[in-house]
Image (cartoon, rainbow, N blue to C red):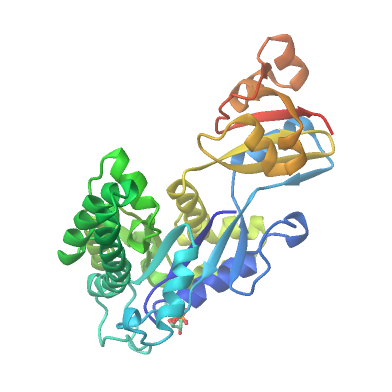
């Protein structure tokens, strides 16, 4: 499964946020294929459509799909040189598919800021620089290697070299690989290098309790938004402390709490949704009387691969899928009515599954 790593300087609210994630935690028994690791938190992906399908089908059980976050211990200035947890830390980032960078946007005199004052842009720059330096190091090695292999007329090395040089130039300018305009071929090569700064990134602005309702007027948040715009990154605003408190509440209490605070969606829900879209993920549903369930797939995946998300046997023995779009099913009012209206399609191996498809897989065992 794809995972997003939570990073940030010390004392910005990472642990508080990660606590909220694990407390809100999805029921592990439903997700036997998820990672069991104290540094991994599994959360349910909020999806209104699942409630609607549950009303429609009235199943014994409803199971949302889940998403994993990895807590990556504090990065400090000099990490790329081995400071703090240094290289270990960077290798953990290498293993995640997206980065959620928590940025301190709350002023609190009681909580020390590592660099002495609250300055989100400078914090972001410290972290991004460490990522750039780590990438620079791997690029330099590759450049030396490519130069050697080129002499032997190695085709891959010849194709790789201009991309490496382009990357080096960007890194020297303090730019992230993500912000470079690559051609499709260049991007394919760059992706093969497993660079930290090519991973999609989300900035998580952590504001104080009393500013969450009016976060757009928070000058720190404004600065982060400006910065992110130039960085092809998204921003969400949360109050980690509130999320931690809210993680213990049931749905009804949560809704009342949010209303009191004057916000419509919890920070955690926003975080899950943003990470989901950052990774190009989408959801399909299965809707049987035993179980109505949401499943995560990557946009562009074909029907057999999507069946494989449930079980590898489903992919191996895939015959076809019966599918109906969520909207059309809801409009019809029931599966039988949707069939009668000709909305249920038979799809084969080449079918590219769409977000919201309700699927029934036929397969050989
Ligand atoms: P980490 O080092 O990044 O993991 O930071 P922590 O999560 O341990 O938070 C550092 C301190 O900031 C703790 O005392 C938290 O209670 C506090 N803190 C975290 N988030 C918030 C917040 O949204 N508002 C306020 N006022 N304090 C927070």
Give the answer, above or below, for where 355 lies relative to 10.
Answer: above
Give the answer, above or below, for where 95 lies relative to 347.
Answer: below
Give the answer, above or below, for where 92 lies relative to 286.
Answer: below
Give the answer, above or below, for where 224 lies relative to 118.
Answer: above
- Residue furthest to the top in view is 341
**Point 32% across, 85% down: residue:** 113
- The C terminus is located in which quarter? top right
- Residue furthest to the front in view is 152
Could you tell me if residue 247 is visible in this image? Answer: no
Q: Position of residue 281 (x, y in %)?
A: 52, 44
Comparing 314 with 284, the one in front is 314
Res 335 → quadrant: top right
Comparing 317 with 99, the one in front is 317
**Point 35% across, 81% down: residue:** 79
Res 211 → quadrant: bottom left
**Point 65% across, 42% down: residue:** 295
Q: Position of residue 219 (x, y in %)?
A: 23, 66
**Point 43% across, 84% down: residue:** 85
In the rendered structure, the answer to whether residue 254 lies left or right of residue 55 reads: left
Res 237 → quadrant: bottom left
Could you tell me if residue 41 is visible in this image? Answer: yes
Q: Position of residue 328 (x, y in %)?
A: 62, 20
């Amino acid at each position: 499964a794809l995972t997003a790593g939570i990073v940030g300087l010390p004392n910005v609210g990472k642990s508080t946020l990660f606590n909220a994630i694990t407390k809100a935690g999805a029921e592990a028994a439903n997700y036997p294929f998820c990672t069991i690791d104290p540094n991994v938190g599994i959360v349910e992906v909020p999806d209104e459509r699942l409630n609607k399908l549950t009303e429609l089908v009235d199943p014994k059980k409803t199971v949302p799909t889940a998403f994993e976050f990895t807590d990556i211990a504090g990065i400090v200035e000099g990490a790329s040189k081995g400071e703090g947890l240094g290289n270990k830390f960077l290798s953990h980032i290498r293993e995640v598919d997206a980065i959620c960078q928590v940025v301190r946007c709350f002023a609190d005199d009681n909580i020390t800021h590592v660099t002495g004052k609250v300055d989100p842009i400078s914090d972001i720059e410290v972290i991004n620089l460490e990522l750039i330096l780590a990438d620079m190091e791997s690029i330099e090695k590759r450049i030396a290697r490519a130069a050697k292999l080129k002499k032997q007329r190695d085709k891959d090395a010849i194709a790789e070299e201009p991309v490496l040089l382009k990357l080096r130039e960007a890194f020297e300018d303090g730019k992230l690989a993500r912000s470079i305009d690559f051609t499709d071929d260049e991007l394919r090569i760059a992706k093969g290098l497993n660079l930290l700064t090519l991973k999609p990134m989300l900035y998580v602005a952590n504001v104080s309790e009393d500013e969450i309702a009016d976060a757009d007027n928070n000058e720190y948040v404004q600065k982060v938004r400006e910065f992110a715009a130039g960085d092809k990154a998204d921003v969400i605003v949360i109050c980690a402390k509130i999320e931690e408190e809210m993680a213990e509440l049931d749905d009804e209490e949560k809704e009342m709490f949010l209303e009191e605070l004057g916000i419509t969606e919890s920070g955690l829900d926003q975080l899950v949704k943003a990470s989901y879209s950052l990774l190009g993920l989408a959801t399909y549903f299965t809707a049987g009387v035993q179980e109505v369930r949401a499943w995560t797939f990557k946009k562009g995946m074909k029907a057999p691969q999507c069946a494989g998300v449930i079980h590898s046997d489903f992919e191996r023995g895939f015959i076809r899928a019966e599918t109906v779009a969520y909207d059309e099913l809801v409009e019809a009012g029931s599966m039988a009515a949707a069939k009668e209206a000709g909305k249920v399609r038979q799809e084969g191996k080449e079918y590219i599954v769409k977000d919201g498809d309700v699927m029934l897989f036929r397969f050989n065992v």
